[in-house]
Image (spheres, grey):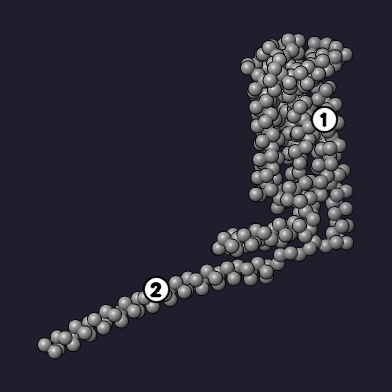
Amino acid sequence: MNKKYVKYLSVLSLVLVLTLVLTGCAQGTTNLHAPTSGPYGFIYKWLGIPFQNLILKTAQAVGGTNAYAWGIMIISFVVRLILVPLSLNQQYKSTTQQEKMRAIQPQLKLIQEAQKKAKGPDAQQKISSLMMQVYKANNLSLTGGMGCLPLLLQMPILIGIYQAVQYSKNIGAATFLSIPLGKPSLIIAIVATVFYLIQGWMSLQIVPQEQRKQMQTMLLMSPMMTFFISMISTAALALYFLVGGVVVVIQQIITNYVVTPKIRKKTDEELAKNPVKVVVTKEMLDEMLQADGTSTTSSTTTANTSEQKAEANEIHKNIRELNKGKQNRNKK
C-alpha cells in the first residue's frame, strides 16, 4: 500500500476512535450524570475525575471570572510543552527524510514515468518493486519518518478534559469571554484551526518543491481534525486545541529556522562522503519497457499470423471447391 495512504488511514482511525469515545460519553451538550459502570465508567474514573480535580485546583490558584478556562489552558500548555521534545524528534526524523528524499528524487521520477508507460501487469509490478529497492539501498523509510505517537499520547488527555467538563457542574457552567465551556464554540474552533493551518503552511516551506503536492493533503488532516472534534465536543476541548496550535506554530518556527538548516548541512556532508546509491537508470527502465513492448508485439504478431494462415486456408479451400465445380460442369 502506498505510504501516503497508510498515513491517512492511521490518522483517520485515531480520529474515529476519539470521535466514538466522545460521542459515546455524551448524550447531549450538557450531561451531568457521570457514567458509573462499563467502559465509559472506567474511563471517567481514571481520566475524568483526575482531570476534574486538576482543573478545579488550578482554577482556585488562578482565581478570577475566567478561572476555569485559564486552568484548562494552563494544563493544556504544560501537556503540550511535555510533548514538545517528542514532537521535535518526530519533525527531525521527518525533515531528515525529506532532505534525503531530494537526493533520490531523480530515480523516483524515472520509476514514476516508466510506470505510466508500462503496458503489461508484470512489467508494472517489476518497475514498482524498484522503488522499494531505491529506498532500501539508501536506508530510507517508506513511512517518511512520520509517526502518530504524539497524537496517541494526547488522546487520554483529550478524553479526560472532555469528561471533566461534561460531568462537572462548576466547569460545565463556566465561561471564557462569555463563551460557555460546556458547549461547542464556533469562534474558538475557527481560531484553533487557523493556528494549525499556519503551522501546515510553514511546514511546507521547508519541503522540496517536488514533494509539496504529496504533502499538502496530509497537512490538511490536522486542521480538519481540529475543527471537526472541536465542533462535536465542547469549547473547553477547543481551548486545548487552541493552546496546542500556538505551541505547534512556535515549534514549527524552531524547526524552520534552527533545526532544518542544521539537518541540511549535516545531510550534505553525509552525501558528500556517502553518495546516493544508484539503483535505477534510464537505460535499465528502457530495456524493461522494450522487453514488455516486444513481448506484447510478438504475441500480437503471432496472433495475426495465425489469423492470416486461417484466412489463407479458407481462401484455398474455396478456390478448390470452385475449380471442382467447374471440372464437373465441363464433364457434363
Quarter-of-image position of residue 175 = top right
Quarter-of-image position of residue 184 = top right
- Looking at the image, is 288 positioned above or below residue 262? below
Q: Hey, what amino acid is under mark 2? A: Glu
- Front in this rendered view, residue 10 or 327: 327
- Front in this rendered view, residue 6 or 187: 6
Label 2 neighbourhood size at 10 Å, few (<14), some (14-19), many (20+)? few
Location of the C terminus (image quadrant):
bottom left
Question: Position of 292 compared to 226: left or right?
Answer: left
Residue 21: give x, y in percent of width and height: 67, 25
Residue occupying the far left of the picture: 332
Kindly identify which residue carries mark 2: 307
The answer to whether residue 306 of the structure is visible from this angle is yes
- Looking at the image, is 136 positioned above or below residue 63? below
For image coordinates 73% across by 47% down, the residue present is 143
For image coordinates 78% across by 17% down, the residue present is 49
C-beta proximity under 8 Å, tags 2 and 1? no
Secondary structure beneath label 2? helix
Q: CA distance from mark 2 to mark 1?
A: 73 Å
Residue 329: give x, y in percent of width and height: 14, 85
Kindly identify which residue carries mark 1: 80
Label 1 neighbourhood size at 10 Å, few (<14), some (14-19), many (20+)? many
